[in-house]
Image: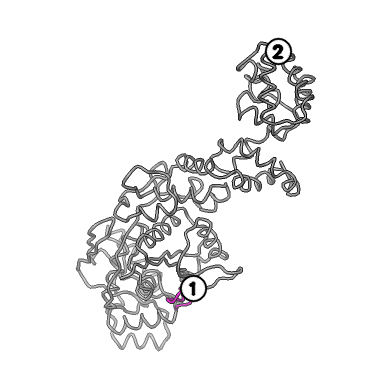
Amino acid sequence: MSVRVRFAPSPTGFVHIGSLRTALYNYLFAKKNGGKYILRIEDTDQSRFVEGAIEGMLKAMAWAGVNHDEGVVMEDGQLVKIGDYGPYVQSERLEIYQEKIKTLLDSGHAYRCYCTKERIDEVREKQKAAGEMPKYDGLCKCLSEAEITAKTLANEPHVIRLKLPENRDIQFNDVVRGTVVVNTADMDDQVLMKTDGFPTYHFAVVVDDHLMGITHVIRGEEWLISTPKHMYLYEAFGWNPPQYVHLPNILNADKKKLSKRQGDVAVEDFLKKGYLPEALVNYIALVGWSPEDNQEIFTMEELEEKFSLERVSKSGGVFDVNKLNWVNAHYIKESSDEKITDLAIPYLISAGYITEIEVKESYEWLKEMVAVVKEKLSYMAEIVDHVDIFFKTEIKPEDDEAMEILKGENMVTLLDAFASKVEAAEVIDVDFGKKALKEIQKETGLKGPQLFKPIRVAITGQSHGPDINQIIKILGKQNLLSRINYVKTQLI
């Protein structure tokens, strides 16, 4: 049987980093096994629907390169469906659910429940007070046909519940968790169909997974407790269940489930900060899964080749931002100067360093500047913290060390010598910088930090930083002369 897996998000807002990992693992498993990866929208809880959430989710997945074979896609700004197993949006499948719920009612595996919310809440409070597990007490399970007919004729609002057998073990095998056994005494007669005619997740997911031919359900561990109900539904329908795989949670540094209270958790957060999608995907793959060797940097193709469900951990994986930054910094360094410059430009424009018009006029200069600082970046938004030295007109020593260097006894001599070299130069490039500093060394007898640091502080305000010859080239003749003059007249 050909592998078919699915990612089935609800359109309730941003795409959590855990959702991206679930989608990624489904995608990788499908690719590894020559199968199909399906994207289905689970929107049966209409009260939680967020306008634009589907479009946002599709954008995030496309950015990450986790592309599905079937399901909902964006084409020319419109949502369309591709594949032979649709509809792929649950709210468009209501007739299917109505047909299947009738099957369960007719077979006696489900029943109508007319209890009010107030009664159910009261029952559960009493159960809690008695130290019992709160669950539906099964009152409507025992209604006679006459009572059901009368309530139906009276059009009384009701839900439809799963009719679980009493005191029976339900067992299934999970790839990550092994054998799981739960007794129906510890389970609830789950609501399958709500009063508004929409199915609950627990009913729709089983119907959809079966009709879409899903062979492996790879999802978060929060659904592990619900799986016995799903297994019984498969049995009630006479269907073969899929293989279940419940992934460990992604945890924060405190070993608690990652949530927005601890910082960035949405894919969009990382996109806005300028993380590279290949870096985020690379890192997320390793939060809960480990390769057979100690490899840490993977292309998507390498992940597709090496991924296996058997090496998914049972315990939660810690989301370490520092490790993510390390991975992302690697990808920034390995990327072309053109790519990183294009990614940097929006941040430089937003910070007011340059305008869109100036970008076109100064692209090559920008590329040289970005090439000098890109090794300092953990993510692209940090670019604005490292380029001030190339844009400011007034030089101010950034710390006590720089101030001390400005007060050195040889400062004026060095600056005069350097200024004369700049004024005489026809071209300011890296070779000019190397040659000028060598000549000044011979003329003054100063070398090493005694030579380089005073000039660096004079033209940047910093005592440490990128290669000084690269800085000299990027700043250019007029900038160098104006900065030297400012230091001589205002700071020394």
Is 400 on the left-hand or right-hand side of 358? left
Q: Residue 27 at x, y = what percent? A: 41, 60
Q: Residues within 10 Å of mark 2 (few under 14, many from 20)?
A: few
Q: Are marks 1 and 2 in contact (CB under 8 Å)?
A: no
Which label belongs to residue 235? none
Is 330 on the left-hand or right-hand side of 430? left
Q: Residue 9 at x, y = what percent? A: 45, 64
- Figure quadrant of residue 172: bottom left
Is 176 on the left-hand or right-hand side of 452? left
Q: Nearer the viewer, residue 216 or 166?
A: 216
Q: Amino acid at mark 1?
A: Ile
Is 399 on the left-hand or right-hand side of 247? right
From which residue to which does the magenta span run?
81-93
Q: Is residue 431 above or below residue 377?
A: above
Question: Quarter of the image containing the N terminus?
Answer: bottom left
Q: Nearer the viewer, residue 191 or 95?
A: 95
**Residue at the image position 54 percent from the left and 43 percent from the top:** 332
Which dot, 1 or 2, sits closer to the camera? 2
Say whether disc 1 or disc 2 marks the residue closer to the N-terminus.
1
Which label belongs to residue 443? 2
Q: Amino acid at mark 2?
A: Glu
**Residue denoted by label 1:** 82
Q: Is residue 484 above or below residue 336?
A: above
Q: Residue 352 at x, y = what percent? A: 72, 43
**Residue at the image position 66 percent from the left and 11 percent from the top:** 445
